[in-house]
Amino acid sequence: MGLPGIDFPGLGCGLAIVRDGKILLYKRVNAPEAEHWNIVGGKVDHMERSEAAARREAEEESGLQIRSSEFLCLSEQVIEADRQHWISMIYVTRDFIGEPELTEPDKLSALGWFDLDALPQPLSRFTADAVDALRRLEHKSAVRSSEGTKDALAL
């Protein structure tokens, strides 16, 4: 059968957690992309919807209670150094309860809230894709604001 992400492309998920214009990032301990800053996320289990998987992974990794989320972007990661290939559905939320914690120190070593213009480096590939999508939303929101309309996903 093989291992997802290694023997065949794996299906992953991620959740960009945003508060007061800042994104929550964690520093990864293990491959793929060890020592990279990452949004919360992981593997989608068989028969699990990607949005539910993103919420589950976020709650496990952050200790937050996620109330709702919306689709943000799709990311494909071909990580040559780790010989892994993932396709990830990424969601965004601003609707959560609690304060983030390091609940899985064997997987994540640090956390912080970061302004989109002052991000730590290096970022994981799917985190960079999520940040790019958030910046596009922020730009659209600014344009709509100048036109007098509102964007529900605005930072």
Image: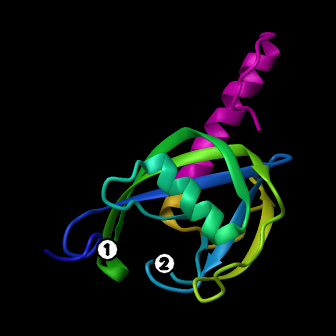
> Left or right: where does residue 8 sit relative to residue 102?
left
Q: Amino acid at mark 2?
A: Glu
The residue positioned 30% from the left and 70% from the top of the image is: 5
What is the crowding at mark 1: few (fewer than 14 residues within 10 Å), some, or many (at least 20)?
many
Locate residue 10: give its quadrant.
Answer: bottom left
Q: Secondary structure at mark 2?
A: loop
Locate residue 46: give its quadrant.
Answer: bottom left
Mark 2 and mark 1 lie on one chain; the one further toward the N terminus is 2
Looking at the rendering, the stretch of residues picked out in magenta corresponds to 129-155
Numbered circles on residues, count: 2
Does residue 128 appear in this view? no
Which residue is the site of mark 1? Answer: 84
Q: Secondary structure at mark 1?
A: strand
Which residue is the site of mark 2? Answer: 33
Does residue 4 appear in this view? yes
Q: Position of residue 25 (x, y in %)?
A: 69, 66
Residue lying at the far left of the rendered structure: 1
The numbered dot on residue 152 is: none
Q: Position of residue 38 (x, y in %)?
A: 60, 68
Magenta segment: does it hold 148? yes
> Where 146 sits versus 9, above or below?
above
